[in-house]
Image: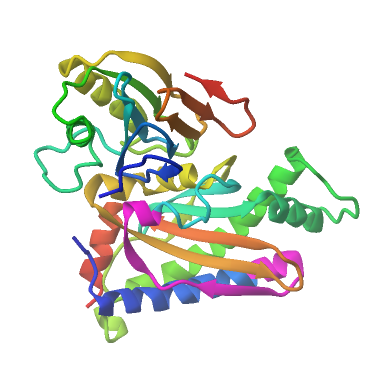
Amino acid sequence: MNRFSDRQLSQFTSIIRMGATEASHAMSTWLERSISVEVEPVNQLPLSIAADQLGTPDATLCACLMNVTGLINGQLLFAFDEKSGLCLSETILNRSDSVQSWGELEISAAKETANIVGCAFLNSLSRSLPHLGSKDESTVEEVGSDCMPSAPVFLRDYAAAIMQSVLLDQACCSDSVVVIKSDLRIAELPLLFHFMFVPDAESLDKLSRLMP
Amino acid sequence: MKPVVTSGELLVKMAEIGVGCRSGTLKTLLGSCIGIVLYERSLQIAGLAHVVMPNSAGREVAIGKYADTAIPETIRRMESLAYGKRLSLVAKIAGGANMFQRVTTNAFLSIGQQNLEAVEKCLLELQIPILARHVGGNLGRNLIADIGSGNVQIQMVGKSIVQI
């Protein structure tokens, strides 16, 4: 069963696009590099398709995951392949030598990037969401406080296994899931970072009520 | 519904069921979900269910998603390949990881464990012996079941391949 109409999905996508743009600006400032962002339209997908959103199911990826609580609840995922992640760490740590494996410093650099990108996205969401469905400030619906992220957790695992874990909450309540995904690329480098927000089932219900 | 595998590899995704006979492999990637491999040795028929949740609560859609509906449906599809012969099934199960345990704080924390318990209960009720388990932990699993032999191979990132 679909929670959102096409109109609502379009509205939701606009809000996400603002958040993803803000996230890419934050990443650009952090890395002192130009970042391009590609926002996929918000969509409702069957579980089997949603689980492939990070690419080849058995590809090993790195991911930083943050729980989100407040205005809406869910999970933020910042995922990337080994090469992109290690190159990101080299850039942040200002290293000229190439690192081949993940040490504490490299993981810390990745988590800090996820935190910066995630906070920028959530700040934008916190500004946009209370105005959903209202035509003027006086009718702004009260939906709670800001969105707050937890400290990121880092892991290396199969792409499909990572996705299963973040889809679980929605999968409990529905056979189709809402996945919000953007791809971030660093200019002139063949590096790709997936940035994903997966609201929990209760928050999706709240959003569907707020959007006309 | 997934095609029946008789050669090559079939990827069974979340909430899906795959069956095959004689040769080929059934593959799935598991995080907190449970993969149940059912095998009939004499007829070389294998089934793989990728279970996401423990209980359907009577729902009749997405039958591959729930332990209590996916296992009977896998058996039904395997029986359709047996030409009326009675199946003598054994099971191997894997998955149920809690991958983000340090960040996951909600009620779904132990979903992997709940899935595992539901699968074991269902197999017990159906009198299907569990020959091997590779469950729990905090890493995902790449499961490949060989239809010809019933062997199940498990790989985890950064670890050696294990046969169960």
Which residue occupies the foreground of this view, A90 or B153? B153
From the viewer's perspective, is residue A200 above or below residue B85? below
Q: Residue furthest bottom?
A: A135
From the viewer's perspective, is residue A32 above or below residue B131? below
Which residue occupies the foreground of this view, A65 or B80? B80
Q: Position of residue A177 (x, y in %)?
A: 31, 57
Q: Position of residue B64 (x, y in %)?
A: 24, 41
Residue lying at 30% horizontally and 76% vertically, measured from the top left: A132
Q: Does A31 appear in magenta?
A: yes
Which residue occupies the foreground of this view, B144 or A196? B144
Residue lying at 86% horizontally and 50% vertically, measured from the top left: A98
Residue lying at 42% horizontally and 67% vertically, measured from the top left: A126
Q: Position of residue A80 (x, y in %)?
A: 62, 54
Is residue A198 among the parts visible in the rendering? yes
Q: Does A205 appear in magenta?
A: no
Q: Residue furthest left?
A: B58
Q: Could you say which quadrant of the image residue B152 lies in?
A: top left
Q: Which residues are magenta?
A: A26-50
Q: Is residue A166 left or right of residue A5?
A: right
Q: Is residue A28 left or right of residue B103?
A: right
Residue lying at 75% horizontally and 71% vertically, measured from the top left: A33
Is residue A73 among the parts visible in the rendering? no
